[in-house]
Image: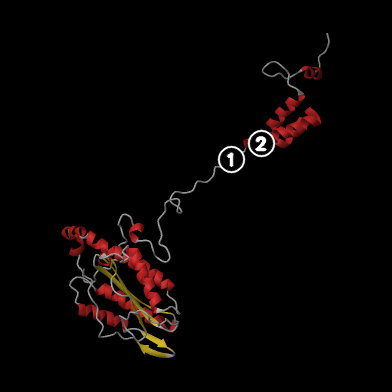
Amino acid sequence: MTAVTPDSDMASLSLKDGKGEAPSANGAAAANGTAGDSLDQGSDDEEDGDEGGEDGQGQANGAGEGAAKKKKKRKPRKKKKAGTGAAGGGAKGQSAPPRIPVKQLFPNDSYPVGEEVDYKNDNAYRTTSEEKKALDRMNQDFLNEYRQAAEVHREVRKYAQKTIKPGMSLTEIAELIEDGTRHLTGHMGLEEGDNILGGVAFPTGLSINHCAAHYTPNAGNKMTLKQEDVMKVDFGVHLNGRIVDSAFTMAFEPQYDNLLAAVKDATNTGVRAAGIDARLGEIGGDIQEAMESYECEINGQTYPIKAIRNLNGHTISQ
């Protein structure tokens, strides 16, 4: 009886595929190479090289790299968020100079409410009563025209404050403001009766230095704004006869900063003091007290800031 050794049994073993055929050496090397990629590539490649020879090792490495490339997934491209940019249908912005009517920027006629300052002596009844709330809702159309005109004034004012510089003529400044007002209200005044529906409420006031208010440059005016000047700009917007009027002071020298702070504080004080049942004399007294609490140093000399006594306000009724 012949003895069977383990080496002879191992030599007679062979691998068969599903069809009962033994795979070639190259196929075995490729299979081993693929398996090596899914497990530990370094150690399996060495074993495959011992069994399949140099040619088998090269094919195994090539097949492994091909399988690895197939496994790489493409990263999906990032989608642009809706609503960003002009193509996304985002919020519209005003042009420079302002030429887009505000009705196009607010197609739903929902204009910004702005800052609401409570009257200091007001009582809760005026703000909590259901009857008062119902009356306020009835006046939304009335208030909406004011808010539309206020938005026109705000956008024109913002552009004017950025654009007005020393060296510009008063006529150029007035045309800059009034052209913007006409475009944003949508009433250019070219047709008969159009300026009654909306547009410029009154001629733009550009008062320099000692001129307190209500100076308007006429045609042919040669005056120009200088670096050391202090200019008061006063212009109004109206829609259906409802006037929104506001003025601001411009100065380009740092020595006038305290003067600008005084008039700003006085304006805010007057807004807080105004309200139903408030007396005009009391409002004026609060404005004067706030303004005259400031001082301004000009060319090394300190001056007390004083309110102008013979200059009064006006109503803005329709």
Q: Is residue 40 visible?
A: no
Question: Furthest residue to the left?
Answer: 131
Question: Furthest residue to the bottom?
Answer: 301
Question: Furthest residue to the top?
Answer: 1
Q: Nearer the viewer, residue 201 or 32?
A: 201
The answer to whether 300 is drawn above or below residue 13 in the figure is below
Q: Is residue 34 left or right of residue 246?
A: right
Q: Secondary structure at mark 1?
A: loop
Tell me how far mark 1 sits from mark 2, CA to CA: 13 Å
For disc 2, the marked residue is 68
Q: Secondary structure at mark 2?
A: helix
Q: Is residue 294 visible?
A: yes
Q: Nearer the viewer, residue 263 or 189?
A: 189
Look at the image and tell me in which quarter the C terminus lies: bottom left
Percent position of residue 257, x then y: 41, 80
For disc 1, the marked residue is 74
The answer to whether 137 is drawn above or below residue 288 in the figure is above
Rendered image coloring scheme: secondary structure
The picture quadrant where one finds residue 220 is bottom left
The picture quadrant where one finds residue 312 is bottom left
- Packing grade of label 1 (10 A; few <14, some 14-19, many >=20) is few
The picture quadrant where one finds residue 181 is bottom left
Q: Residue type at mark 2?
A: Ala
Question: Furthest residue to the right?
Answer: 2
Q: Which sits earlier in the primary sequence, circle 1 or circle 2? A: 2
> Which numbered mark, 1 or 2, is in the foreground of this view?
1
The answer to whether 97 is drawn above or below residue 38 in the figure is below
Percent position of residue 177, x then y: 37, 71
Q: Residue type at mark 1?
A: Arg
Q: Residue at x 37, y 89 (%)?
A: 303
